[in-house]
Image: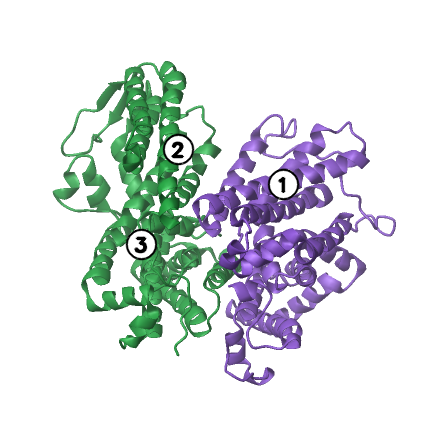
Chain colours: A green, B purple
């Protein structure tokens, strides 16, 4: 039954993919291409860069027609024999082309800084990547972590408060500690007190939202100096930072971007190449077997969920210490949940989570830049883009990606 | 989750479960709320005054009771919807978005058909709210049924999308109040408003006919859940999805129906707000009602009658919290902390027992 269901869903997915791609092709050819006149200019460097690259100039109308043709071809292939095998790849390639066509249309007769957008993509991916990483760490030990949003918010708040009093480094350390504290609380609630994991997460979110909003309206409104933290500046890595296009994106960023990249590397190594990581994954897949082999299931869950909280706390500090230095009520705006979607998209793997976060970061920075280009699309709809991408990802990939087997189930030691 | 959501708690007798634990949770949350106030440098006298104001503002006078009922009505309506979803095993966080969309639909219906008499227009506007709420919630239900996308994430995203949609609609010339630059909708005509009930005594009393709507819905949800075939299917697939499927129930249809019913109730809550209290739609008019309603449904043990009491409690906290802010200068956000703590103590029976071991009889065979 399972196989039949999978085959028919694969077939349906193939058809849906084909319809989407052909639909996009028609849309572009009929609506966008006639509308696009003149050249679209993509700037690849800023005047201050060491190596100046000529901007990429393309004729907008013809390029959109070409892309529409490619999309139509990819879509048509879905209806031929064996198309199902390529459904996901075609959809990915097709959507990438679609975004490119869209950008060309929006930039027609204007100029657009590609470097700037890539840099913004990386910056905006950071909290999502760290949230997703926190999700990976706790779901690998089978604790569903809905509380990431709350942990990010707690990190942001602590970063602003302690950062104002003790400087950036102190604020960052405190944010990590408070994130870890909430991770520990989550672990205590779900492991020791066996509270339902989703409810525990929702409660932590509500609690953090209430507490931070309370303090911010009760204390910060009166004592403004408590909410005025220094911001970490970008550090340019010599030579690497001068690489055109990707240099500013990867090597001219603040400590949060570097931290996120390092953490992704470290946690990949931890989960897949160390003894403790193997134990953690065993606890996530089959806690009873792990217990039988002498692994302390409860302790493993405590440690990993606390670590996840620390990662999320660091990610939360990005909102204050990494960007504006000031805390606002509910400033995380659902990034923790987007992080969870990125975790699923990234198939519960740190590197996958980072890649997925970059997609979301791209959607986020794209909507910002498009708002500046003054397209006829209302800004509210552009602002929805990251959320819609999240829904599509969660809907489209569940079933293809496999969660840790014991995910969400409490373990009672016999 | 299933046990808690479906109203059973492990290892407790019924009295403990229905009376002692909620009471304990409220008292404990108030104590921790006081600790929070102490930590933010508020002196004991002010804390005392704020809790007195909390009580006075919720039940201390006719006006206070009226405010409590006004605040409780949307919480109960949305809470009923969430309870329905919980019974069917769906953790719907999307009441907020459904309230926004339902309220918006009710306003637009109200001012579009302003030539109709009230006896037609009011039910029509309420129905529009319920319908749009149901449709909006069904998106998440459909995604869950067709693709397995977890409703927690999709409903949260739909909440965030609903805020943007509201902003967009409020900027449309058709919806926006003529002559206003800020995003405010046209006002609901008087015929579409839920009439206030006690203006004869004092024109400032805000309690309105929405409370009758609440009573009808409580009865309806009770009947639906415990007396109808569909409700049986909801509960069966919530308790044991596999068994329900083998018994020949269509899990996909049940999920979509449960989400739609939950969305209809949340949409009604939104309609209740705009037609009874606000008179128009503004950005953020939902004011977090959908999230408070989650707490209400949990506290009410997903039972319609429990939801009424929980909604009244939260309505009282809300009304009293406003008084507290005025009288003692303590931010109303404190109420959010107290509400979260109440749920923690309700939802973690083992935690309560660890803090308060002598209050509960121990059953044979340990905790669970």
Task: Using the image, name the chain to which the residue with label 3 belongs.
Answer: A
Q: Measured from the top left, where is residue A384 in percent x and y?
A: 45, 37
* CB atoms of marks 1 and 2 within 8 Å: no
Q: Identify whether A340 is placed above or below B334.
A: above
Task: Using the image, name the chain to which the residue with label 2 belongs.
Answer: A
* Inter-mark Cα distance, 3 to 1: 36 Å
Quick one: A376 or A319, which is closer to the camera?
A: A376
Q: Nearer the viewer, mark 1 or mark 2?
A: 2
Which secondary structure, mark 2?
helix
- Report the residue at 29% width, 32% height from top: A83
* Inter-mark Cα distance, 3 to 2: 26 Å
Disc 2 target residue: A16
Relative side of B345 to A279, left or right: right
User: Would you say residue B157 is visible in this rendering?
Assistant: no
Q: Identify whether A405 is placed above or below A121.
A: below
Q: Residues within 10 Å of mark 2 (few under 14, many from 20)?
A: some
* CB atoms of marks 3 and 2 within 8 Å: no
User: Would you say residue B141 is visible in this rendering?
Assistant: yes
Task: Using the image, name the chain to which the residue with label 1 belongs.
Answer: B
Disc 3 target residue: A348
Q: Nearer the viewer, mark 3 or mark 2?
A: 2
Q: Residue furthest right?
A: B200
- Identify the disc placed on residue B102: 1
* CB atoms of marks 3 and 1 within 8 Å: no
Q: Measured from the top left, where is residue A185 in percent x and y?
A: 42, 69
- Identify the disc placed on residue A123: none
Which secondary structure, mark 3?
loop
- Asked if labels 3 and 1 share a chain, the reply is no
Q: Earlier in the sequence, mark 3 or mark 2?
A: 2
- Report the residue at 52% width, 59% height from top: B243
């Amino acid at each position: 039954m399972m196989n039949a269901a999978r085959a028919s869903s694969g077939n349906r997915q193939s058809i849906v993919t084909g319809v989407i791609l052909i639909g996009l092709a028609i849309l572009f050819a009929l609506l966008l291409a006639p509308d696009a006149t003149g050249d679209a200019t993509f700037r690849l460097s800023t005047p201050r860069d060491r190596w100046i690259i000529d901007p990429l100039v393309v004729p907008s109308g013809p390029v959109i027609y070409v892309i529409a043709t490619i999309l139509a071809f990819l879509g048509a292939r879905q209806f031929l024999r064996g198309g199902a095998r390529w459904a996901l790849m075609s959809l990915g390639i097709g959507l990438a082309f679609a975004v490119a066509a869209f950008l060309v249309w929006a930039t027609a007769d204007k100029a657009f800084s590609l470097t700037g957008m890539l840099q913004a993509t990386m910056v905006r991916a950071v909290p999502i990547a760290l949230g997703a990483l926190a999700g990976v760490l706790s779901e690998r030990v089978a604790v569903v972590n809905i509380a990431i949003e709350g942990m990010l918010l707690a990190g942001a708040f602590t970063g602003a408060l302690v950062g104002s009093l003790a400087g950036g480094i102190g604020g960052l350390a405190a944010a990590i500690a408070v994130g870890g504290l909430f991770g520990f609380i989550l672990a205590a609630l779900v492991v020791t007190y066996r509270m339902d994991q989703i409810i525990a997460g929702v409660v932590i979110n509500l609690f953090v939202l209430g507490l931070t909003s309370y303090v911010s309206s009760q204390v910060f409104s009166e004592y403004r100096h408590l909410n005025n933290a220094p911001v970490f500046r970008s550090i340019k890595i010599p030579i690497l930072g001068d690489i055109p296009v990707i240099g500013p994106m990867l090597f001219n960023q603040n400590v949060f971007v570097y931290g996120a990249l390092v953490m992704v590397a470290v946690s990949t190594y931890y989960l897949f190449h160390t003894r403790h990581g193997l134990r953690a994954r065993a606890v996530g897949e089959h806690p009873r077997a792990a217990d039988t082999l002498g692994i302390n299931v409860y302790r493993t869950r405590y440690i990993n969920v606390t670590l996840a909280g620390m990662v999320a706390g660091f990610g939360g500090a990005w909102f204050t210490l990494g960007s504006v230095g000031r805390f606002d009520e509910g400033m995380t705006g659902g990034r923790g949940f987007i992080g969870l979607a990125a975790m699923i998209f990234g198939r519960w793997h740190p590197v996958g989570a980072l890649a997925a976060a970059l997609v979301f970061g791209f959607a986020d920075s794209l909507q910002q830049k498009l708002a500046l280009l003054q397209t006829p699309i209302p800004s509210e709809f552009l602002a929805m883009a990251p959320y819609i991408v999240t829904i599509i990802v969660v809907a489209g990939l569940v079933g293809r990606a496999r969660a840790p087997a014991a995910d969400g189930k409490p373990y009672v030691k016999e | 989750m299933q046990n808690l959501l479906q109203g059973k708690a492990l290892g407790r007798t019924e009295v403990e479960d229905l009376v002692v634990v909620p009471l304990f949770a409220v008292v404990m949350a108030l104590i921790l709320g006081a600790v929070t106030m102490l930590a933010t440098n508020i002196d004991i006298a002010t804390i005392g005054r704020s809790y007195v104001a909390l009580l006075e503002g919720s039940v201390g006078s006719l006006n206070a009771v009226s405010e409590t009922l006004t605040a409780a009505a949307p919480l109960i309506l949305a809470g009923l919807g969430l309870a329905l979803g919980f019974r069917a095993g769906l953790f719907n966080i999307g009441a907020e978005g459904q309230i926004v969309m339902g309220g918006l639909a009710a306003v637009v219906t109200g001012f579009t058909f302003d030539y109709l008499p009230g006896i037609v227009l009011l039910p029509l506007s309420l129905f529009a709210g319920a319908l749009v709420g149901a449709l909006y919630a069904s998106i998440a239900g459909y995604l869950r049924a067709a693709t397995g996308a977890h409703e927690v994430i999709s409903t949260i995203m739909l909440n965030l999308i609903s805020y943007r949609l509201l902003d967009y609609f409020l900027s449309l010339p058709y919806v926006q109040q003529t002559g206003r630059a800020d995003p405010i909708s046209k006002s609901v005509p008087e015929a579409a408003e839920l009439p206030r009930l006690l203006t004869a005594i004092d024109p400032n009393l805000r309690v309105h006919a929405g409370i009758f709507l609440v009573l009808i819905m409580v009865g309806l949800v009770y009947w639906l859940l415990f007396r109808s075939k569909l409700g049986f299917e909801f509960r069966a697939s919530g308790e044991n999805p596999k068994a329900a499927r083998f018994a020949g129930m269509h899990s996909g249809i049940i999920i979509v129906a449960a989400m739609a019913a939950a969305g209809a109730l949340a949409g009604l809550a939104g309609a209740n707000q705009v037609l009874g209290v606000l008179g128009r739609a503004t950005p953020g008019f939902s004011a977090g009602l959908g999230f408070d309603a989650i707490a209400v449904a949990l506290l009410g043990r997903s039972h319609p009658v429990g939801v009424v009491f929980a909604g009244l409690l939260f309505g009282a906290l809300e009304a009293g919290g406003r008084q507290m802010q005025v009288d003692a200068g303590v931010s109303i956000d404190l109420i959010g902390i107290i509400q979260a703590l109440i749920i923690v103590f309700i939802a973690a029976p083992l935690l309560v027992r660890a803090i308060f071991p002598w209050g509960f009889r121990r059953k044979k065979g340990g905790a669970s």
